[in-house]
Amino acid sequence: MSVAPTLRERSEAEASRLPPLLARAEHLAGTVLLGEHGRRRAGLGDDFWQYRPAQTGDSKRMIDHRRSARGDVQYVREREWQIAQSVMLWVDQGASMRFSSDRNLPTKVDRARLLGLATAILLVRGGERVGLTGTTLPPRRGNEQILRLTQALSQDTDVDYAPPEHRAMIPHARAVFISDFLGDLSEVELALTKAADRGVRGVLLQVLDPSEENFPYRGRTIFESVAGSLRHETLKAGDLRDRYLERLARRKDDLHQLCRATGWQLGLHHTGDSAQAALLWIYRALDGGTR
Amino acid sequence: MTVLAGIGFTAPWILLGLLALPVLWLILRAVPPAPIRRLFPAVTLLLGLKDDESVSDRTPWWLLLLRMAAAAAIIIGLAGPVLNPSRDETGTGPLLLVLDASWAGASRWPATLNQIDAQLTDSGRAGRPVAILRLSEPEAPVFQSGEAWRSRLPGLAPMPWQPGEQQVAAAIEAISAIDGGFDTNWFSDALDYDGREAILAELQSRGNVTVYRAPTAVMGLLPSTFEDGAIKLTATRSEPGPAQSVTLLAQGRDPAGTMRILQTATAEFADGATQAEVSLALPSELRARITRFEIQGQRSAGAVSLTDDSLRRREVALIAGRRNREGLELLSPLHYLTHVLVPTADFVDGALLEVLPANPDVIVLADVATLSEKEEADLVEWIEKGGLLLRFAGPRMAASDLGRHEEEVLLPVRLRGGGRTVGGAMSWGEAKGLAPFPENSPFYGLSIPDDVTVSTQVMAQPDPNLADRVIASLSDGTPLVTRKPLGLGQVVLFHVTADAEWSTLPLSGLFVEMLDRLAVASAAKARTEAQLQGTAWAPAQVLDGFGGLSDAGNLAGVDGMELVSGRIGPDLRPGLYQSGKERLALNVLPEKAELQPAVWPADVPVKGQEVNREKPLGGMLLALALVLLTADVVASLALSGRLALARAAMFVMAAILAAPQAHAQDQSDTEFAINASKELVLAHVLTGDRKVDEIARAGLRGLSDTLFYRTSVEPAEPIGVDLERDELAFFPLLYWPITPEQPKPSAEAYARLNTYLRSGGMILFDTRDADIARFGSASPNGRKLRELAAPLDIPPLEPVPRDHVLTRTFYLLQDFPGRYAGAEVWVEAAPADAEQIEGMPFRNLNDGVTPVVIGGNDWAGAWAVDRNGQSLLPVGRGYAGERQRELAHRFGVNLVMHVLTGNYKSDQVHVPALLDRLGQ
């Protein structure tokens, strides 16, 4: 008898995690108008585009007899060109992302998941195929995929500074990497060069906590990473501020250089800011790239 | 005790600990503050960064200083510093402390005890045996250690008398019985008494005598006297000093029975005077309540003056010439007199000869012209023993030959035949006003209203002694009130009637004041020795030295003569004495007493009462150390960046400390009252079941909306009422849904509910179960209703009859559905004699409003709407359901109309008849 309640509780807890993230992501995605997504030209696709008079070269099968029967001219029914793009997501689920400096701020991983999933929802609505990098969840279409994405994005890993997953990238696809990029830069470099080799372009979004941007600490302090793998002790934290900020700026610069070299776009988002602005930026960045 | 710079130390060696402070300084300097651990993902960017300075972040110097100061305060505090260490330990050998211990020192008693305490401590330290002798209650002194006496010190209390002959003799005997020499410290109360020199001489023969006395004068209050309608109070002081004013308090029970200060008066001592008088004119009702006077701020028996029967209610016999003319209540000659005297006097009823043996204080004869010889003789005898005969003129007196030719013994003046009428329809002139009262009149000083006029009066014959006997006259000089003494008593004649026939005087407040001044309403009769001869009095309550009254217990009774002439002492305690129904107050100070200050010979050193008490400083220093350490905690937190946490904690502390809860309660009570009474508000009883309460509130909101739309009743947002806490008087209607779980109200709440029902409130009980049960004990709700309503004051009930007012106060209704329909609704039953009126289809039912309406139709459920006005709960099905909801609303409207208009609607029955009669 005791197994059932535990199982029930666990499944309830599991289930309770999905809808809020999904709901928030749907909510966030709902704020973006899908105004510019259609290709606006005739092509392969399911949606009707226009009727045009049949020309020489059109095969007889292409003639739309229902329209043509109304007159003497023969019409060909054209469909809008629709092509599904594959977009691959990577959201850093490492322990370092589970951090927020203030109770009122969301953790970085929370914001990253929200943005990733919202992007996925938008893309799926636009008819794209969305998946995760790596082999766990290849790009697919449909709302079912969003549920699967939600599930995959809700799993924490205990490793500090998870390296970007760069395996099994589909050539000429698009990619979205969301992380704080505070770990080893060479891993990012490796992933990006590999992606560039395969013709994959995309977006890097760096999510930072405001305290990581300001370094508002003073006094004798031991700084620890979230999983506890790294620590640094200082006697006067206030004195480190300038040098820390310098290093942070250099890290951003490195990322920028890397992106320039590989044709990716780099964005910066703070958890203290509105998620909507970041989502719009991602969407624009992806959209601009596909046009 | 070691003394350094005026400060003594009980444990000076601990001060050596101060030497360790420099070491502590070095240690604290070397140890950096503890690090704080922080999660910080960007630590990767920090790796490899070195601190600029190789030395650690040291504790700043001011923090070190703070900690040093705390450590020093602890060390010095533990060393036991004492300010003003007493060092004047002169004298050796036994010490006798002599106390007057009379009422005169009572108001300074705590100071005296402090001083004695200090001396006992000193003697204990010096090892001197001590004895204490109280002169007001001398016992053989026992020499003991000072510490032993200190434990008995709180038991010493001053006595409410001065040492008398017996006490002085006993004291001298006790002193002479002591072996060997001793020094004496005499704590004097600064008042002189006989035998003081003898005791002083006896003490001086045995050793040094030092006198301690306070520099302030002793104050006392003499017994109050009652003269000319005012209470005269006299305060006295022992030494003539500069001008001073003292506040005298008159205390007594208010109508609710609690002791309170009824009146205050200020007595002014002139410069150099020892007596100050003030007279207190009080309404007799208030005066009769006073039980004691006292000087404010003087806590002694001498500053208290008890009152007795002299301020009590008087007994008055009213006798009128024409009695019992049926039905003319307002024309009764005694009507106004009765109303004036009811608050202050008791009436003795009966014929004249029957009331005389009861010995009333006052007999009033209103328009009585003829008295039998026996009556007259008895009346004269009674007046001569101190009675007051008050006569009023009238038509009979004017028509009779009373006092026409010679002066009647029971009339102050001779009368002329017939009297006169002025200002009437058949006479010249205008009605006369009153002339100002002459200075020798008891009415002197009363203000005369303009509207007091006299139109008819009996006239006095001019006589040589007429001028002496007139105490009030009209503006043309004719006498209005005359008076003559007769033996110990007096006869007073008002030349007008006691009713408003001849003058408007009885209608005015002046009439009340005049009767008051004539001591009709109260009196002061000092008892003479002759009256008290041979009576025995038992003490009822006695004063203690501080002026407090306590039960006399089984103290022995005293002879009446003693009360007048005896000297106050252990055998004759001041207080209230009782004999039969009479009470007599015996005060500490007799009438005309003077307080004599004690004068000491020049060779006796006299000291004041200041005491330079030792003041230990250790506790203060330790507290200072705690404060410093607290500051250190805050400073350390601030330094290590953890102040945010500390700040939060401080906010919590401040919130806890500053929560003014009682005040908030007060405030919320006022707010509740304002909210409930600003507009008409419907209310429901909070049952504790949240869902039921919400529905009840929503239901009343729906009903309020309906009333607002359809009628001129515009209620505000309904209120939930907590029976235990909230005032109910503001609500015309209480809706009380019954749940089986709700708690039973407390007894006080029931008392309030009953008051509410009696004063016109209505409770609508709703068992909300008409779908499953009829009204009765069949359902749990019904049973609960019976339990809840049992202590309530509910009249007999009946189902609403077809002609009840409730069926037609606004809408014409015959059934009263709520969410459920059909169950009977019960209201107060019609009285057995209620009848149908003039063939109208309904009876004139209960004059008032039914106090309860009981049913089970869940009306609130039918009325309930949400904020947007949408119905919350379904009623019935389809159109029929909506019709039922409409009827439920109509019932609510009728109910509220019924509460607010009472039986007005049933009176509307007569409108057609009235219109018919008016010819329209």
Image (cartoon, rainbow, N blue to C red):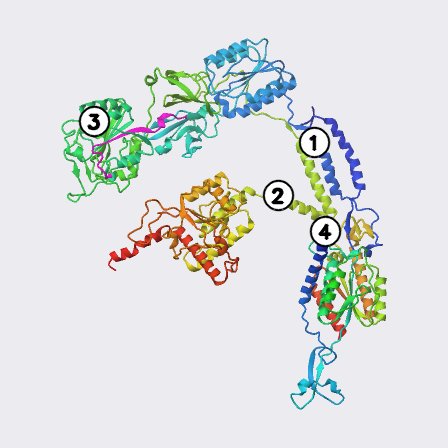
- Identify residue type, mark 1: Gly
Residue A94, x across and y down, in percent: 79, 57
Position of residue B660 measured from the top left corner of the image (x, y, whole percent): 57, 43
Q: CA distance from mark 1 to mark 2?
A: 31 Å
Q: CA distance from mark 3 to mark 4?
A: 112 Å
- Specify the segment rendered in magenta: B306-328
Residue at image coords 35%, 26%: B310
Asked whether, in this view, residue B10 is left or right of residue B735, the answer is right
- Crowding at dot 1, Cα within 10 Å, few <14 / some 14-19 / many 20+, comes out as many
Closer mark to the observer between disc 3 and disc 4: 4
Q: Residues under labels 2 and 4: Cα distance?
A: 46 Å
The three-letter code of the residue at mark 3 reads Leu
Q: Which residue is mark 4?
A: A4
Pointer 1 with pointer 2, Cβ within 8 A: no
Mark 1 or 2: in front is 2
Q: CA distance from mark 3 to mark 2?
A: 80 Å
The foreground one among A72 and B69 is A72
Chain letter of the residue carrying label 3 = B
* Discs 1 and 2 lie in a common subunit: yes
Residues beneath discs 3 and 4 located on the same chain: no
Question: In what element is the residue under mark 2?
Answer: helix
Q: Which residue is mark 3?
A: B410
> Of helix, strand and loop, which one carries label 4?
helix
**Marks 1 and 2, the one that precedes in the sequence:** 1
Element type at marker 3? loop
Residue B781 vertical placement versus B355 (above, below): below
Q: From the image, tell me which residue sits under label 1.
A: B77
Q: Earlier in the sequence, mark 3 or mark 2?
A: 3
